[in-house]
Image: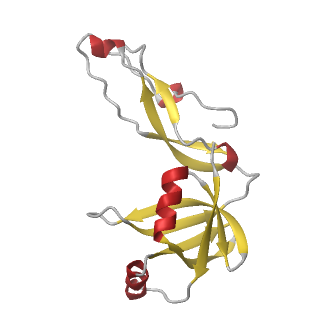
Amino acid sequence: MAEQITLVAQARDDKGTRESRRLRRAGRLPAVVYGLDQDAQTVTIDANELVRLLHRAGNNALINLEVEGSGQLTLAREIQRHPVRGEITHVDFVRIRADQPVQANVPVRLEGEPEGAREGGVLEHVLFEVVISAKPADIPQELALDVSGLNVGENLRAADVPLPDGVE
């Protein structure tokens, strides 16, 4: 289930490409926080801390974003990366409420070796993530799908992915 982590952010007024590049050189990332019928707010966060926290807790981690002393429960909705280096360049955080369901993309991990692969078939993994709806605390980090019973010519669908309680 989703882990809640705390990330300290600083509000920022300067916008634009030039200022964003300065922030990135200084080890900070430009970000925006929006949602829950509140105005969007531009912030900066420590780049290394975000990478470390997302690596440990996953992309669907609940982030308590502390901006100037006030905490906001958020999810990292969109993480933009540099096309060549793969470094994070910008993050969009969406404000959420703990008691209302949200949608999230959850990776699907295949388990086992299909019987058809032992007979010379090839397993083709087409769907790498599914969109689920759940309360923020119930969002799983990944969903496991057992493929060991598949024979040549058989397939599984997204509806065959077993979901934990409270997840649709």
From the top left corner, tell me how far across and down residue 87 is, in percent. Answer: 36, 65
Q: Is residue 144 above or below residue 41?
A: above
Q: Is residue 94 above or below residue 163?
A: below
Q: Is residue 35 above or below residue 164?
A: below
Q: Residue at x 59, y 53 (%)?
A: 61
Q: Residue furthest right?
A: 99
Q: Is residue 45 above or below residue 60?
A: below
Q: Residue furthest left?
A: 120
* Total count of labels: 0
Q: Residue at x 45, y 41 (%)?
A: 129
Q: Residue at x 46, y 70 (%)?
A: 47
Res 3 seen here:
yes
Q: How is the image coloured?
A: secondary structure
**Along the line of sight, which residue is nearer the eye, 15 or 69?**
69
Q: Residue at x 50, y 30 (%)?
A: 144
Q: Quadrant of residue 94?
A: bottom right
Which quadrant, please, contains the N terminus?
A: top right
From the top left corner, tell me how far across and down residue 161 is, in percent. Answer: 52, 28
